[in-house]
């Protein structure tokens, strides 16, 4: 009986990770493809999207994040990243700490919020090489990766990964899946007993 309870609790913990709010970059508006090409001379746009589960019915009014390993936007560096956000109410930049807010909740009923698009224009192939992984992480200033619900309460989000020029699609995953060998997860299960 105890083994069954432990198994059920472990599945619930891992299901919680899969059902959390997430911010990531995608090649499609359905937020399912987190990899794509960035090639010299060919402008390419990708979507920054928040996928909502717990807040899907009410939507979000703000988000804050940083994109780790986002290429520097500079001709001398080899290319430009041009963001276009869905709200004029923004603070900061996605390289260090970026915040965006809307006057009304976004994504209510759909569970998807288009935060903006990033257009990549590469001049030098070394600017973004093979298997270039960009990850949504906590911002430098706020030390947070969050979405804000309709009642203006911050909710911690999971950061997605985007893979440019992926050479092995099976290895280029949007998020790291939790495993039963993680100390914190198993310790949390054991602490219940």
Image: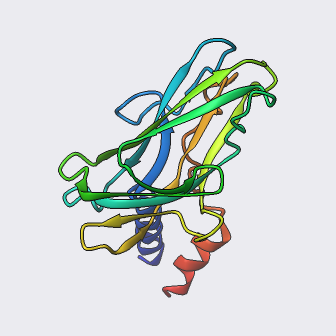
Which quadrant of the figure has residue 4?
bottom left
Q: How is the image coloured?
A: rainbow
* Along the viewing direction, whichever of 166 and 119 lies nearer the viewer: 119
Specify the farthest residue to the top: 41
Horizontal side, residue 104 vs residue 133: left or right: left
Which quadrant of the figure has residue 149?
bottom left
Looking at the image, which residue is at 71% across and 33% down? 132
Would you place residue 106 above or below residue 81 in this image?
Answer: below
* Along the viewing direction, whichever of 32 and 3 lies nearer the viewer: 32
User: x, y percentage for residue 124?
Assistant: 78, 19
Would you place residue 77 above or below residue 157 in this image?
Answer: above
User: x, y percentage for residue 91?
Assistant: 50, 59
* Along the viewing direction, whichever of 98 and 37 lies nearer the viewer: 98
Would you place residue 53 above or below residue 42 in this image?
Answer: below
Looking at the image, which residue is at 46% across and 50% down? 23
User: x, y percentage for residue 44?
Assistant: 54, 21
The quadrant the N terminus occupies is bottom left
Looking at the image, which residue is at 71% across and 44% down? 69
User: x, y percentage for residue 5?
Assistant: 41, 74
- How many marks do you count on the picture? 0
């Amino acid at each position: 009986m105890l083994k069954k309870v432990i198994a059920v609790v472990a599945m619930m913990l891992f299901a919680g990770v899969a059902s959390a709010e997430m911010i990531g970059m995608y090649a499609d508006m359905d937020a399912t493809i987190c990899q794509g090409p960035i090639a010299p001379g060919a402008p390419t746009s990708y979507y920054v999207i928040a996928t909502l589960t717990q807040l899907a019915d009410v939507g979000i009014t703000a988000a804050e994040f940083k994109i780790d390993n986002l290429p520097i936007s500079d001709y001398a560096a080899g290319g430009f990243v041009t963001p276009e956000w869905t709200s004029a109410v923004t603070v900061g930049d996605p390289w260090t700490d970026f915040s965006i807010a809307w006057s009304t909740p976004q994504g209510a009923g759909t569970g998807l919020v288009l935060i903006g698009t990033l257009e990549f224009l590469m001049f030098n192939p070394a600017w973004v090489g093979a298997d270039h992984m960009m990850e949504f992480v906590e911002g430098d200033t706020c030390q947070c990766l969050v979405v804000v619900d309709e009642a203006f309460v911050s909710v911690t989000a999971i950061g997605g990964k985007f893979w440019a020029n992926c050479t092995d699609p099976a290895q280029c995953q949007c998020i790291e899946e939790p495993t039963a060998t993680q100390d914190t997860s198993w310790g949390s299960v054991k602490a219940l007993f």
